[in-house]
């Protein structure tokens, strides 16, 4: 596959990698100095990940805890900055530990430079992690 050319194309490609549980491939879409932020993260969860290696460490255990099946609703909005998109989406799947369904909505503000994610602010619903089996961060929640 040729490299995605627009932020929207890169984002769609990243979702396919997550569904395929290809975390190394997903991490490879990040700039070395990329920044991932979670403004609504509850206590015990990271609010800021600086650099590709920190993002990789955070995402590595994700498929062992969350089994994503689909992103049935994805709306990508262009902004006045051609490198930035705002994404509204819904992810569905199950929690591996309990088998319980997962249905989460997200809003993300994503910036791409030179074909790589440089900034990703993920406004996910912190109430969803109250479910047993949802925490993959290694916190003591």
Image: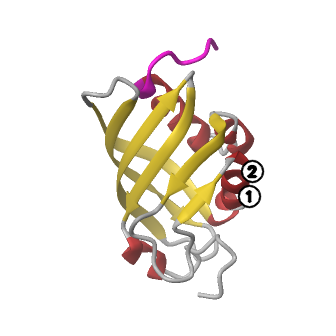
Q: CB of mark 2 within 8 Å of CB of mark 1? A: yes
Q: Is residue 14 left or right of residue 79?
A: right
On residue 7, the disc is none
Q: Residue at x 44, y 26 (%)?
A: 7
Mark 2 = which residue? 53
Mark 2 secondary-structure assignment? helix
Q: Residue at x 45, y 65 (%)?
A: 102
Mark 1 = which residue? 57
* Residue 4 drawn above or below residue 75: above
Q: In which quadrant of the rendered view does residue 106 lie?
A: bottom left
**Residue 83 position in % (x across, y down):** 40, 27
Mark nearest the camera among 2 and 1 is 2
Q: In which quadrant of the rendered view does residue 122 lie?
A: bottom left
**Residue 92 position in % (x across, y down):** 43, 55
Is residue 9 magenta-colored?
Answer: no
Residue density around tag 2, few if under 14, some if 14–19, many if 20 or more, within 10 Å: some
Is residue 4 magenta-colored?
Answer: yes
* Residue 134 drawn above or below residue 73: below
**Residue 121 position in % (x across, y down):** 43, 52
Q: Nearer the viewer, residue 62 or 30?
A: 30
Q: Main secondary structure of the magenta part?
A: loop
Q: Is residue 76 left or right of residue 4?
A: left
**Residue 56 position in % (x across, y down):** 71, 51
Q: Residue at x 34, y 34 (%)?
A: 85
Magenta part of the chain: 1-8
Q: Is residue 105 left or right of residue 129?
A: left
* Residue 26 drawn above or below residue 9: below
Number of numbered discs present? 2
Image quarter hosting the C terminus: bottom right
Mark 1 secondary-structure assignment? helix
Residue that extends furthest to the bottom in the rendered view of this protein: 140
Residue that extends furthest to the top in the rendered view of this protein: 2
């Amino acid at each position: 596959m040729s490299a995605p050319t627009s932020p929207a194309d890169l984002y769609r490609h990243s979702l396919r990698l997550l569904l395929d549980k290809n975390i190394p491939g997903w991490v490879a879409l990040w700039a070395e100095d990329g920044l991932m932020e979670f403004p609504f993260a509850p206590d015990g969860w990271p609010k800021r990940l600086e650099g590709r290696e920190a993002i990789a460490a955070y995402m590595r255990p994700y498929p062992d805890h969350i089994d994503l099946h689909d992103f049935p609703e994805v709306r990508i909005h262009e902004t006045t900055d051609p490198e930035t998109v705002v994404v509204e989406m819904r992810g569905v799947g199950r929690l591996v530990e309990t088998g319980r369904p997962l249905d989460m909505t997200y809003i993300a503000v994503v910036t791409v430079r030179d074909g790589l994610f440089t900034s990703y602010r993920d406004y996910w619903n912190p109430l969803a992690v109250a479910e047993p089996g949802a925490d993959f961060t290694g916190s003591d929640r």
